[in-house]
Image: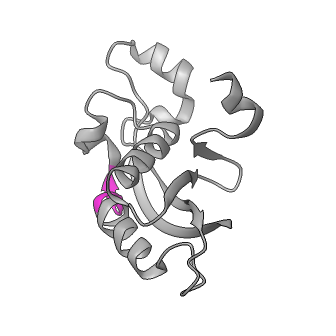
Amino acid sequence: MRAYFSRRYRLSASHRLHMDTLSDAQNRAVYGKCNNPHGHGHNYVIEVTVGGPVDAETGMVCDMVNLDACVRKEVVDRFDHTNLNLDPLFEDRVPTTENLCIEVYRLLAAVFDQAELVRVRVEETSNNSFEYPATGRIAAKL
């Protein structure tokens, strides 16, 4: 039997949405107030979903303590209270929340092997959230 387990984590980070290849006016047109030269911050909520068979002995998809330790080491310790623009992952990429979501997924997929990483969802604000990989009809088109 396959089941899914989701867990939420919180971190705070700042970023500035800006592309050096665009003029200041073009950056303001594309990114609006998110192009503030001083940056701005978010209190992100990162939801990690893993899936797999339910272990007959433990009754769990994965050990929550191990998942917490992995997310803490690979994601929270790396990004919490930082400027995302200064992280090497965003050296050549704009640190949008979409790109952050993809990078969190990649970081976890590379090291967590107790269950399948099904998706990562990053909530930037109460109105904006992003998830990777895409699911449902959208994923079928990708």
Q: Tell which residue pokes out farthest to the bottom in this image.
A: 57
Q: Position of residue 31 (x, y in %)?
A: 53, 27
Residue 89: quadrant of the picture: top left
- Residue depicted at 25% across the width and 43% down the height: 86
Q: Position of residue 61 (x, y in %)?
A: 56, 72
- Residue depicted at 31% across the width and 56% down the height: 82
Is residue 52 rendered to the left or right of residue 102?
right
The image shows residue 118, relative to residue 96, as above or below, that is: below
Q: How is the image coloured?
A: one colour
- Residue depicted at 31% across the width and 40% down the height: 85
Q: Tell which residue pokes out farthest to the right in this image.
A: 137
Quadrant, the N terminus: bottom right
Residue 137: quadrant of the picture: top right
Is residue 38 rendered to the left or right of residue 35?
left
Is residue 109 rendered to the left or right of residue 46?
left
The image shows residue 130, relative to residue 32, as above or below, that is: below
Comparing 104 with 44, the one in front is 104
Is residue 99 rendered to the left or right of residue 58?
left
Q: Position of residue 3 (x, y in %)?
A: 66, 66
> Was residue 128 drawn as part of the magenta stretch in this picture?
no
> Was residue 81 drawn as part of the magenta stretch in this picture?
yes
Residue extent of the magenta highlight: 78-83
Quadrant, the C terminus: top right
Comparing 131 with 4, the one in front is 4
The image shows residue 34, relative to residue 7, as above or below, that is: above
